[in-house]
Amino acid sequence: MKALRKKRLLTVLVILLFSGLGSFLIFKALDSNLDFFFTPTEIIEQTVPDNKRIKIGGMVLEGSVIRDKTNITFQITDYKHSIVVNFNGAVPDLFKEGSGVVALGYLKNGIVYAEQILAKHDENYMPPGIEIEK
Amino acid sequence: MLVEIAQFLTILSTGLFFLNFSFSFLFDSKDQHIANLVSKIYTHSSLLLVTSFLIYVWLAVSDNFSVLYIAQHSNSNLPIFYKITSIWSAHEGSMFLWILFLVLWGALFNFVTDNLQDLKVKSMGIISIIIVGFLLFLLLTSNPFETILPIAPANGADINPVLQDPALAIHPPFLYMGYIGFVIAFAHAIAFMIEGNSSVKWEALVRTWSIAAWVFLTIGITLGSWWAYYELGWGGYWFWDPVENVALMPWLAATAFIHSISVSSKSSSLRIWTILLSIIVFSLSLFGAFIVRSGIIDSVHSFANDPERGLYLLAFIGILIIGSMTIFSSRLSMLTSGSAIKTFSKESFISINNIFFGVLVFSTMLGILYPLIYESIYEQKISVGAPFYNAIFVPMTVLASIFLFFSVEARWQRKFVIRSLINSMSISALISGSLVFSAYKIFNITGTWELISIFAGSLIIIRYLFVIWDYLLNNKYSNPFSVIAHMGLGMLMISIALNNELSSERALNININQSDMYQGYEIKLSDLKLVNNPNHDSVQAIFTLTDPLGNNFYLKPEKRKYFARGQITTETDIYVTLLKDIYITIGDQLKDGSWIVNIQFNYFIRWIWFSAIMMSFSGIMLIVSINRAKR
């Protein structure tokens, strides 16, 4: 009886140890791979680390799009502040001045160098955290 | 008029299904008359529902825009095929299709099994009450039969152009068939626990059904991946989008389930776990429906945001889970039976494989839910992207495949002797090692995880080649379905690793009659054409590509503008070779008339889907062989 109990206790302990270790590793992987989402105002008001991949969402500011061959520079705005975004490549079909956009990339000297530009499928899409006062 | 009839039929079938549920639980299910009655009522109520759906299809085909849903999602200019598929292009119709499939799975089961088969009556009752739950959801929160009165619009608003595509038209039906097909296993598990007779082999009764559902789910996910690749113009095969993830979770759990079913049905030692898995698989399928339908997660796929629908579904799933878990915990003593698992038996390996699948499901769930939790605590929006999933999935899959490698010759309820296999195993390891070395030297593959994945993948494939060799030469028995499916897994790992390492893309800026070079290919924009179509206009760019050997071929990507919604879409064009796809899309036209052109070289991408097809093929073959053995 005692031996059996000891064995059971050991099994439970081993299971606990492994699931604890597993959860720790999973949460660690999670924490180091989060993409934080900011609006332009939040970027200006908070300190955003420049070695972390971030998402910035807002509207493409009217008249801000400058193209130079495959390079595109534009401003993302929440109609309070704007942030310059630089991207090399083809932008999605729904990318338009005055419509919603999300850029995924790194912030460097106040400019977002985007790896990816997302415009939403839904034409009525509005990036989170933005209320338009027009 | 027709639409009212359809709605009436649906309401009528809801009542009948409920009646069926009551009969199967109020009366003695061992009674032949009751069993026949339940079976008959089910057939009749499903006929009512199928008729209702067919009327709805007819309404869509005949452009009946007095029906609100059809007016919002179809258009008289659409080809008939897309008029039909427009039914499942949005929420209400998708739910209707979902219910239709749920009913059909039950009807097929009802049709092919004997009325007195163990657990049948109660299972039909459980399926009926689930149908009632979904029908009430449909009728109360998302009624597809709603009409526009008194005057119907002249034309419909059209289906979203990116959904006007054959692969996407059949992708949701396959996915739904897969999701909802696990209802048979779920209903049997519950019925098994309620009846409380532990000598019934419920696993054997649901094995074929679960594999069939798994095959549908696998094909559905693959179709979705393929569609996203060529239609969205991003060139990837998987984006770790929440909606993809909610399809992946039931798939992972279901894969674990169909593995453990064979253990549980052979030695009943993993019974508790298998019952639990059947509940998990079905709950995850419903959770998938909840995530997509409620719009609580911001995704490229999300349909309308509707808290009422989300709440109903959440309550429904909650009742199902709490109910089944209550039954489960009250029957624990009945389920704990059978012998302990021997180390290094096949059961032990399958138990380990279940742990891996469990970790993957848990991590995916965490990736979906963590942003919601994080936001409510820290008021900071975050998202979890590919890096997290890669960090979990890659090492887990590698580890799992190492275990798989050792388990190949394991036998049921028996330890296996490693010494007799040492030759084939070390030779496999040696060959895989040299493959990795040549991948490193010749193809310049340097990523550590890529090399490890290639090693693990080829380890599996070569190990199974030995099994095939043994079969051909010594006529030694092997399970062909396991061989094909697992070789598919090996190939999947290798092709994903190679795709990840070798693929590249570049945006080019080309004017007409100019050319540019990329990866040794000359890309020339030789012509631009305007093409008129019934429901859209398009600009077609014609590229002449010259490969390093001087061979020419043409690629014709398009930009389309659809009339009904004014939406602009990009059509890719792809040149497929054995090892790589050359993938071109056109972006915007700049002021000087030149075009932004995106070119991608996607290596081994076809092999990824082919691996998935191998897995589903093994499932289909297994079903065929089980049915043949029964006769």
Image (spheres, rainbow, N blue to C red):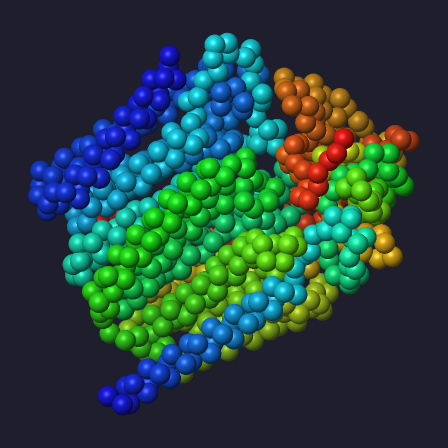
> Can residue B405 be spotted in the picture?
no
Q: Is residue A5 visible?
A: yes
- Left or right relative to B127: residue B31: left
Front one among B554 and A14: A14
Please provide percent x and percent y for residue B102: 34, 38
Which residue is located at x 73 percent, y 45 percent? A57
At 54% across and 45% down in the image, what residue appears?
B296
In this orientation, which residue lies closer to the viewer: B466 or B217?
Answer: B217
Q: Is residue B2 above or below residue B429?
A: above
A8 over B124 or under it: above or below: below
- What's the residue at 23%, 42% (across, down)? B124
Please name the residue shown 25% across and 30% down the image.
B15
Pick out the residue farthest to the front: A133
Classify B258 as above or below B576.
below
The picture places residue B149, in percent across and down from the top left corner, at 47, 13
Q: Position of residue A118 (x, y in %)?
A: 70, 43
Residue B578, percent across and down?
Answer: 63, 49
Q: Considering depth in this image, is B306 or B495 the residue closer to the camera? A: B306
Task: Classify the position of the N terminus of chain B by image quarter.
Answer: top left
The quarter holding residue B162 reads: top right
Front residue of this view, candidates A19 and B551: A19
Residue A30 sits in quarter:
bottom right
In this view, A81 is above or below B349: above
- The number of discs equals 0
Q: Is residue A102 left or right of residue B258?
A: right
Q: Is residue B415 left or right of residue B487?
A: left
> Which quadrant holds residue B334?
bottom left
